[in-house]
Image (spheres, grey):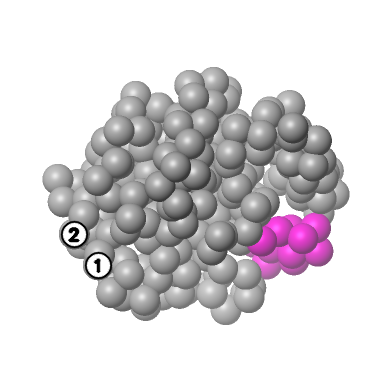
Amino acid sequence: MTYAPIEIAPSILASDFSRLGEELKAVEQGGADVVHVDVMDGQFVPNISIGIPVVASLRKATRLPLDVHLMIDRPERYIDEFVRAGADRVLVHQEATPHLDRALSMIREAGAQAGAVINPSTPVVMLSDVLDKVDTVLVMSVNPGFGGQKFLPIAFSKIRQLAEWRARYNGGYRIEVDGGVDLENIAELAQAGANTFVAGTSIFRTPDAAAATRELRRAATNALSQRV
Ligand code: DX5
Ligand code: ZN
């Protein structure tokens, strides 16, 4: 296994950008494993968020790996720049490019870990021919574009399918889930086979982001130890 069984990935989209450094410190203290960074272009998704300069600033502010989720059309145009800015992992949507295989190769060639993402309406089979070229598969459990949305349970069957293929074919990819992840669903998601849990609202929109990070990890870890 080349991936950690459980990773908590706070999504800074839900943080207070005027206090980004402090917010990062809080989740570091809470034991966060990676920092999830949502990049939106107002085309692929109906929202605009942050871009390359913010990734470069984050790189200076934390030693945690940066998990850069590109919600942009034809992401291959910007992969090199995001990696140069400090992205450790770059995740591209299957729906955003006709050349997913090429985009994933570009990420690895640039020196980062490669991730492929699917929207709630995209079946996992769309990724079956690239599973040997990814370090991460990210299953969206909301329609991308906004934080604070309701979790869509379609993610469970996708995670189970990906975990089954991983076991059957000895795959090395981690399974990540993004959108509406909280203390209500993280245990079942861990049992389904998810490893990396992106959480925005359930971490940063609480009184204590460090405690919320710890609680999510505890719930996921307990669920794994109880798995029969
Ligand atoms: C949604 C983003 C998510 C978002 C998750 O487009 O990809 O990473 O920040 O936020 P919550 O945890 O609030 O659903
Ligand atoms: Zn995201």
The residue depicted at 40 percent of the width and 71 percent of the height is: 112
How crowded pointer 2 is (Cα within 10 Å; few <14, some 14-19, many 20+) is rated as few
Q: Nearer the viewer, residue 29 or 127?
A: 127
The answer to whether residue 138 is above or below residue 133 is above
User: Tag 2: residue type?
Assistant: Arg
How crowded pointer 1 is (Cα within 10 Å; few <14, some 14-19, many 20+) is rated as some
Q: In screen coordinates, is 10 left or right of 213? A: left
Q: Is residue 48 magenta?
A: no
The residue depicted at 54 percent of the width and 35 percent of the height is: 179
Residue assigned mark 2: 102
The residue depicted at 21 percent of the width and 54 percent of the height is: 101
Residue assigned mark 1: 106
Answer yes or no: is residue 159 visible. yes
User: Which region shows up in magenta?
Assistant: 20-33
In what quadrant of the picture does the C terminus appear? top right
Of the numbered discs in the image, which one, if any, rests on residue 210? none
Distance from disc 2 to disc 1, alpha carbons, whole Å, reads 6 Å
Say what secondary structure mark 1 lies in: helix
User: Residue 181 appears at what percent x and percent y?
Assistant: 63, 34
Say what secondary structure mark 2 lies in: helix
User: Tag 1: residue type?
Assistant: Met
Quadrant of residue 212 within the rendered picture: top right
